[in-house]
Every structure is written in C-alpha cells, then in structure tokens.
Image (cartoon, rainbow, N blue to C red):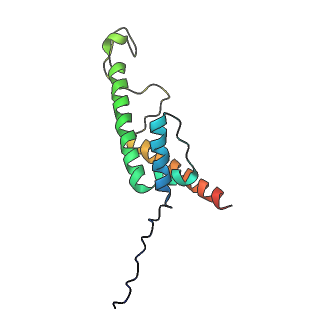
Amino acid sequence: MTPATPQHRRTKPDLSHPIFALTERLRSAARTGRKLHLEPEHVQVLLSEELYRVISAMEAKEMRAACEAATVNDNDIRSGTSGYGSAPTAAPGASAGSKVVPIDAASRGASLRLREEAALMRRRKKH
C-alpha cells in the first residue's frame, strides 16, 4: 500500500491591486461607450511613475504638434500685418503681455500639480 499523496490545491491569484479594477473599468467604458469613473486608488495607479511618464510623453507630443500648427498659422504673411507700418512681417514673436513657457517647463509644472493632487487625495482617504 502506498501512502496517500497530498492533494495540491490551486490558489487563486491575488487580484487586489488597483490596476486590475482600473483595467476592468477602462475596458468596460471602451466597450460600452460610457464614461470612465475612477476611484482615488485608480488615479494613483495612473500617476505611478511608469504610466505617468508615458501619459506625459503623449501629452508633450500632442502639445508640440498643436503649437507647431498654431505657429504656422501665426506666421502666415497673407493673414495680415503685424508690428508698425504697413509691411507684413514673417518673424515670429510673443504678443505683448504673453508668457512664453518652454514645453518642458509646462510638463514639469503639470507633473508637480498632479503629484500634489494625488498626495491630497491620499490624505483625504486616510482621514
């Protein structure tokens, strides 16, 4: 007679990490065309370094494209004259009172703002 071999029970994987609920909600919203509703823990996942780096890069790419398109229109000589006199100029320049901010600085500012907001959300959740 051989000794009984222990039955190995399969354990279920731990799916408690918020990324699983986030991806489930994202797929559901894409499938149904409804709005995506996020809980604070889902926002924290989106603000994680890995994901936020990708999102910021996409945002910066689109911002550069939008700025290029705007610059092309601004520098169009046929659009009218600028400056003193009647001769049109093609030289780009900032309008009076405008703040010219490099795109990298704007992205750093947006990143800082989002991190501050995430920290506030974490504090609210603890209380």
- Relative vertical location of residue 64 with respect to residue 13 in this rendering, above or below: above
- Relative vertical location of residue 4 with respect to residue 54 in this rendering, above or below: below
The extreme right residue here reads: 127
- Relative vertical location of residue 118 with respect to residue 72 in this rendering, above or below: below
Which quarter of the figure has residue 63? top left
Q: Position of residue 17 (x, y in %)?
A: 49, 60
Q: Position of residue 19 (x, y in %)?
A: 46, 55
**Is residue 92 visible from the viewing direction of this image?**
no
Q: Residue at x 49, y 39 (%)?
A: 29
Left/right of residue 101 with respect to residue 113 in the rendered view:
left
How many numbered discs, if any? 0
User: Residue 79 versus residue 39: which sits nearer the camera?
Assistant: 39
Give the position of the N terminus as an image quadrant.
bottom left
Q: Residue at x 65, y 56 (%)?
A: 124
Q: Position of residue 57 (x, y in %)?
A: 36, 44
User: Residue 90 versus residue 15: which sits nearer the camera?
Assistant: 15
Q: Residue at x 44, y 70 (%)?
A: 11
The extreme top residue here reads: 86
**Is residue 50 visible from the viewing direction of this image?**
yes
Give the position of the C terminus as an image quadrant.
bottom right
User: Residue 126 versus residue 100: which sits nearer the camera?
Assistant: 126
Q: Residue at x 57, y 52 (%)?
A: 40
The extreme front residue here reads: 1
Which quarter of the figure has residue 84? top left
User: Residue 8 versus residue 79: which sits nearer the camera?
Assistant: 8
Q: Position of residue 111 (x, y in %)?
A: 46, 49
- Relative vertical location of residue 28 with respect to residue 117 in this rendering, above or below: above
